[in-house]
Structures are given as C-alpha cells and as structure tokens.
Image (cartoon, coloured by chain):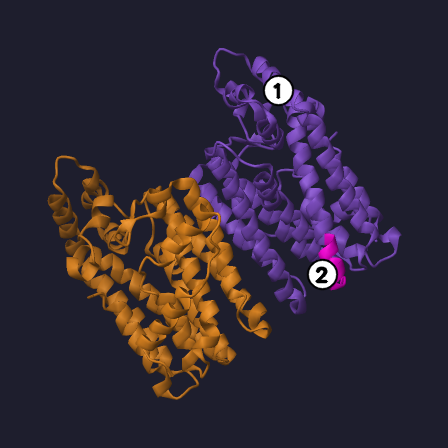
Chain colours: A orange, B purple
C-alpha cells in the first residue's frame, strides 16, 4: 500500500507520459498547459488511495485517476471563461492566453479526453464506473449553474447553498473516491461509505475555503484576504449573517462591496464586523468540524483493517491544512 | 427491417420520451430547446438503418442514436458561440436566447449527457462502442479547430481542406454508421466498410453544401445564395480557384468580400465569374459524384443480401437531395 507521497509521485509520472496529439496545436496545447499547471491533484490522489485501501493496485487505476483530473481541469477552464478570470494558479488562464474560442473548444476536447482516459479501466468494470462518472459530471455542471443563478438572486438559504457546494465541489471528490473503491474491489456498502466520506470532506473543505477568505491569513489562503467580500459573493458566512441580521445590517452586507467611497480595507472590516455580530465565524467553524469529523468517523466503519485507512485519514488532514 | 420513414418516426418517439431533469432550469431548458429544434436527424437515422441492415433491431440502438444526435447538437451549440451566430434553424440560437455562459455550460452538459445515452448500449458492447465514439468526438473538435485556423491563414490546400471537412463533418456520420453496424452484429470487415461508406457520403454532402452556396438555388440551399462568398469563406470552390488563378484573380478572390463599394449581388457575381473561369463548378461536381459513387459502391461489397442495403441507398440519395 503506497503512502500519500508515493501515490502522488506515481500519478505525476503517469500524467507526464500521456502522449496527447500534437495537431491541431491550438486544440491540444492549452490542454497540456492546463494539465501541467501545478494543481494539487486532490481528486486523482483520493481515487488512488481509495483503490489501494481496499487492496487494489493503484497502477491499474491510473487511467481513471487521470480522467477525474482531466475533468476537473476542464471545469476550471470553462469556469475561467464564464467568470472572466485572467489568472489561474499564478499564470494567465487559458482564455486570457489564447482567447475565448480556443478555450471553449479545448475545454470540450478535455471533457472528451477524460472519457478516453476513463475507458482504460478493466472492461468488466467500465459500465459500473461510467455509471458513477457521468452522473457526477452532470452534477458538477448543475452546481456551476446554481452558483451562477445565486449571483442573480437576492436571497439564498443555507440549505440551497450547501446543496450547491455539494454539487459543484463535493460530488467530484465523492465520485473519485467511489471509482477508486470499485477498482479496488470494495463491497457495494463500502463503496457507498467511501462516497459519503469524501462528500462530507468536500463540504468541510469548501466551507473552510469560504471561512479562510474572511478569517484566515494570507499565508493559509494563498491569496489576499477578503476577495469574496469585495466581490459581494454569497458565501456561507454571508448566508449565515444575512439570515440572522437586522434589515439595517442586511443592507450593509448587500451594499458594502458596491460603495465606492470606501477603501478595500474598510469594506472588508465593515462586513467582517457584521459577520462577528451574528457569530458567523464560530458557526461556520462548527459546521466545518462536524463535517470533517463525520468524514473521519466513516473510515472506522469500513469493512477493512483499520490500518488500511491510515492514508485516507492523512489525506483528509492534508486537505484541510491549507498551510503550504 | 424498418424503412427510412419508420426509422425516423421511431427515433423521434424515443427522443420525445427522454425525461431530462428539470432543475436547474437554465442548464436543462436550452438542451431541450436545441434537441427539439427540428434537425434532420441524419446521424441517428444512419446509425439505426445500419443496425437493421445487418439484422439488428433498431429499438436496441436508440440510446446510441440519441447519443450521436445529442453530441451533434452540442457541437452546433458551441459553434454558435464561437461563430457569434444568432440564428439556428430559423430560431434564436442558444447563446442569442440565453447568453454565452448558459450556452457554454448547457453545451457541456449535453456532451456529458451524450455519454449517459451511449451507456444504454448492451454492456458487452460498451467498450467497443466507446472506442468508436470518443475518438470520433475528438476528431470533430480537431476539425472545428482546423476550420478556425484556416480562417486566419492566407493559403489552404485542397488536401488540407478535405482533411478538415472529413474531421468536422464526415467522421461523425462514419462513426454513427459504424456504431449501428456493431449493434447489428456486423463483422469487423463490414463495420470498416460501412464506416467508409458514410465517410465518402459525408464528404460528398459537405462538398455539395459548398457548391450549392454558389451554384444552387435558394430553394435547394434553404437560405440565400452566396453567403459563403460574402463572408469570404475558404470553401472548396475557393480553394480550387485560388490554386489555379492568376495573381490578379487571386486578389479579387481574396478581397471582393471586403470591398464596400460593391453591392452583395455584385460581389457574388464577381467571385462566381472567377470560379467559372477556372472551372470550379464542374471540378467540384465531379468530386461530389466520385465520392457519392464510391459510397454507393461500397454497399454492394457488404457481406449481406443486397436488398438489405436498400434503405442505406435511399438514405444516401435523400441526403444529397436538398430540395425540401
């Protein structure tokens, strides 16, 4: 059973030797650029760890692992068009570098190439793995659409928000873990459990991402604090505060980011003060802990020796520790 | 064995009863809108006819037929963004109706949904059919990228042009026919032959599309004559004329569509006169006949009774007869 670092190294090696076609250059070059952009390889790592936890060999699951990573990078590429994002992982985004049309089309090719990679799983498991992958991929699109819908809406409930982040972020982790488990010949029940483990973990991760944007340090977050506040994003902190605040405070939450008389620092301070007034920070921290602990607890219920879950535990801890 | 009309009716019925999810509305409504936009259902019809020609039952191939139709409509949807096209089949295009972001994302969901439909083929054939579908889908993206590349280039050879239309148009017909043949339990050799039949037919079809734009009637083309000329598109007529014309005539071919002192009618007449000077019309008509006859001739070489190919012959004739 490989540990987390060995799994990552194995995956990076595999990825490096995938020979994408060379022509047409404007179709395939942006794909290679995105895939070598230095992501954290969270989803393929989880897939491969799950495979080995159940006694499988990660080398047999590398195609599926590359498929989920390719799919994830495809979603980032198309999201960057939709969000007009010029920077991705400290480099120009694909639409910024090559223009929107190239970004649309190479994103499409990435999506199709993900199925090409997925096809490499053992033939007797292909149908079952497609039955996990395809609904998962559709749910990610649904999550992205809800996210865009919410930008246009005045009010979003916490339940709606949780459903959105589950679709947009968690199901891809959950599906990756489940595919790994299937490839490792886990029982049906363990496949469902490992799905749930990754789903809870994904929610904890996404909630923490929101929390860090206001209450973390620049070092933990990896970028400037307060970006979500300045964009007026409806994060979980915002949902919580909005659903508890007075009408007056709600106005401040809604409008501060639009107030051109304030500096960025003043905007951030003003919104955070209201978050604190309604105990948003502690509430979200409690939600994060609950989800994280649920995820870890599920590992103990799997029908395998408890030492086999060690690296999945390490994975969960690494995922939540943004310091690096 | 169902005839062409029966196959189409069967397919339309199947399509009408597919229950897409309802929410999020902005993700799924554009998909339903595109799929019910009244296309000619060329690719699924071919797939189902091929299946029955080899003795299969089209009802077992409906998922795969819907997959190729869904994929085709996905390419149209994303093409409409890339081409800034506001109208599709006489109605507002998806980007015109819902905006670009919705069009990107619902296109993505269509692509994924195509795999959901493809998954419905018998499990023992799934791997083989994915091995046809996925490379085909990638080739269509390659064709679209070459098409965009060619717009930026001064000179495109006829061989490059033929390769581009093969990728962009023909391989989807060819792959559809081959998937149908696999589902009808055709031999490996017949699968390759039926692929070739549809590939040649697709080339004839695309060449004719270019030819009709200059030399057809508005009734045959279904829209105004000369659109390609006014856009300065590098069609096969243009390639042929460019590669035979004097430098002076090449200048006219290159620049007429940009000349604001000319009316549309004058531009069309001027370019067509040069096409005629280099015998472009007859040359392309001969190319169309050659491809079409090759396609038909392949049908006689299949390892099935010749009456079983009757509806594939009718399909080829219907495809080339644009009068309707």
Q: Examine the rendered structure and indicate whether residue B147 appears above or below residue A294.
A: above
Q: Where is residue B81 in the image (x, y as percent from the top left)?
A: 47, 37
Q: Position of residue B132 (x, y in %)?
A: 62, 58
Tag 2 secondary structure: helix
Q: Position of residue A299 (x, y in %)?
A: 37, 80
Instruction: Give the extent of the magenta segment.
Output: B184-194
Q: Examine the rendered structure and indicate whether residue A228 appears above or below residue B159.
A: below
Indicate which disc residue B110 carries. none
The answer to whether A289 appears left or right of A47 in the picture is left
Of callouts 2 and 1, the N-terminal one: 2
Quadrant (top left/top right/bottom left/bottom right) for the N terminus of chain A: bottom left
Furthest residue in direction front, as rendered: B246
Task: Give the chain of mark 2.
Answer: B
Front: mark 2 or 1? 1
Depth check: B19 or A10 in front?
A: A10
Which residue in the structure is indicated by mark 2? B182
Local crowd size for mark 2, using a 10 Å CA cut-off: few (<14), some (14–19), many (≥20): many
Q: Quadrant of residue B284?
A: top right
Q: In which quarter of the image is residue A153?
A: top left
Q: How far apart are marks 2 and 1 (CA)?
A: 46 Å
């Amino acid at each position: 059973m490989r540990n987390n670092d060995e799994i990552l190294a194995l995956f990076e090696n595999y990825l490096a030797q995938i020979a994408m076609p060379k022509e047409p250059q404007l179709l395939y070059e942006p794909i290679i650029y995105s895939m070598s952009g230095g992501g954290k390889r969270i989803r393929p790592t989880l897939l491969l760890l799950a495979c080995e936890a159940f006694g499988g060999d990660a080398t047999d699951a590398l195609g599926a692992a590359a498929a989920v990573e390719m799919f994830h990078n495809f979603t980032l590429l198309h999201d960057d068009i939709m969000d007009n994002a010029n920077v991705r992982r400290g480099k120009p985004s694909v639409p910024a570098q090559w223009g929107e049309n190239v970004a649309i089309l190479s994103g499409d090719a990435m999506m199709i190439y993900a199925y090409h990679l997925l096809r490499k799983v053992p033939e007797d498991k292909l149908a079952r793995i497609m039955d996990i992958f395809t609904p998962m991929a559709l749910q990610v699109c649904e999550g992205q659409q809800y996210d865009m819908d919410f930008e246009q809406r005045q009010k979003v409930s916490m339940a709606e928000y949780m459903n959105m982040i589950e679709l947009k972020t968690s199901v891809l982790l959950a599906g990756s873990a489940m595919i790994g488990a299937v490839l490792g010949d886990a029982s049906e029940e363990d496949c469902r459990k490992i799905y749930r483990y990754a789903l809870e973990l994904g929610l904890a991760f996404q909630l923490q991402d929101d929390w860090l944007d206001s209450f973390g340090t620049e070092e933990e977050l990896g970028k400037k604090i307060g970006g979500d506040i300045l964009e007026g994003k409806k994060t979980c902190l915002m949902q919580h505060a909005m659903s508890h605040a007075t009408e007056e405070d709600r106005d401040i939450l809604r409008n501060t980011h639009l107030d051109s008389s304030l500096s960025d620092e003043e905007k951030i301070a003003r919104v955070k003060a209201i978050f604190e007034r309604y105990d948003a920070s502690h509430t979200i921290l409690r939600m994060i802990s609950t989800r994280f602990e649920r995820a870890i607890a599920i590992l103990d219920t799997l029908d395998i020796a408890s030492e086999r879950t060690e690296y999945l535990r390490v994975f969960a801890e690494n995922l939540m520790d943004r310091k690096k």
